Amino acid sequence: MKKLLIFLFILLLSVSAYAGQRLMQGPASSAAGDYPSFSGTDGKTTTNKTPTEVAAAVQALLDVDYFGEDVLKESEILDEDDMATDSATYPPSQQSTAAYVVAGLATKQDTHANITLLTALTDPGADRAMFWDESAGTGGALAWLTPNTGLAIDGTNLNVSISSMDITMTEAYILVGNASSKAVPVAMSGDVTMVASGATSLATDSVAYSETTGSVKALTPVLDAAADFSSTFTGANLYGGTFICDTAGTAALPAVAAGMNFTVVVKGAVATVLNPNATGTEDTIHLVTPSLGYAVQTQGENIDSSADGSMCVLQYYAADTWLAICSDDWTAE
């Protein structure tokens, strides 16, 4: 840049000298030869030039790229408040830049309110998690989460301990011992319904208890006709219940399933027939009595009794198979 200014200064002096000389002498004609020539300090002499030619030469010098790149022109500065051109070459004006930034900020969330909420929190002096408390004031507020019983915050960890936590179970839960295989004590108080419907399975090496208090309520026996067995003796009754048949007929047994275990008692001299399920693969009954011994019935074969007070305990033996341990009054049809 400094060299360019020096060059232009020397050029200006030369043109000024030339113009002064011409004013004093004046040309004999408008031909180029009528203008005097000039000699530089290096001894070289320029050819005679008209003023128009000199002006063209100066303009050519001004158009030279002295900075290694094109000189930015005023016409190349973009006046676009929305930056629609998205040019990688031409810059926007100051006014367009300011307008674009202001318009962009207008679409953003005002963070002043959030900053105010953050500054309202004080150092809790302990590890805490921040949360939104909708019940605090009008519209809620940010607050520190204070661990309640059974919860502890340690650095970035939220630890849960159920050693003294009250849990209301409304769905299915699995209790698993800790990594050291210690026992998981479960204390229950008040009325506890273990199973509303279905079965409870215990998958463990052993089940033990140290003390029982109160009483365990058994299922209420169902008194009904043999023909109504399949409609009135269902659900939990099939897992420990008792059916008392007071009207002769055929009781249709359900499809045998693991865990099923129930008792059938005949009340009065009413002929009672137990018919194994025939859906899919017909079930088989293994009949055991004091006099008969162990007798495997043919697939789908019934057992029956008509003796007052006769009793038969049926339980799951294997897939599609019942084990019936009965009094001597029960026989195979």
Image: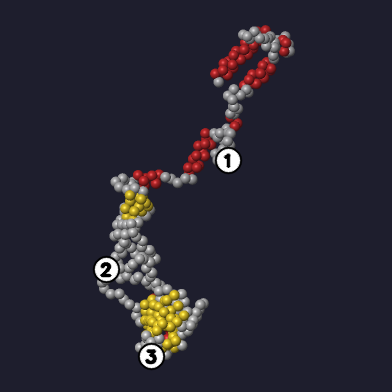
Work out how far the residue at label 3 is from the one at label 2, CA to CA, in angstroms: 42 Å
Q: Is residue 246 left or right of residue 12?
A: left
Amino acid type shown at disc 2:
Ser
* Residue 98 percent location from the top left of the image: 50, 37
Q: Which residue is mark 3?
A: 307
Q: Which residue is mark 1?
A: 84
* Residue 135 percent location from the top left of the image: 35, 55
Q: Which residue is mark 2?
A: 210
Against 281, residue 18 (above or below) is above
* Residue 91 percent location from the top left of the image: 56, 33
Kindly indicate the quadrant of the structure image that contains residue 25: top right
In the image, which is nearer the foreground, mark 1 or mark 3?
3
Amino acid type shown at disc 3:
Ala
Tell me the quarter of the image containing the N terminus: top right
Which residue is rendered at x = 33% and y = 49% of the image?
154
Which residue is rendered at x = 37% and y = 77% of the image?
240
**Front-most of residues 205 and 14:** 205
**Front-most of residues 321 and 115:** 321
Which residue, as the protein is rendered here, is positioned at the far bottom? 269
* Residue 84 percent location from the top left of the image: 58, 40
Amino acid type shown at disc 1:
Ala
Is tag 1's residue or tag 2's residue first in the polypeptide sequence? 1
Binning the other alpha carbons within 10 Å of mark 3 as few (below 14), some (14 to 19) or many (20 upward) gives some
Q: Regarding mark 1 in the picture, which secondary structure is present there?
A: loop
Against 72, residue 268 (above or below) is below
Which residue is rendered at x = 40% and y = 86% of the image?
292
Is tag 3's residue or tag 2's residue first in the polypeptide sequence? 2
Work out how far the residue at label 1 is from the one at label 3, CA to CA, in angstroms: 100 Å
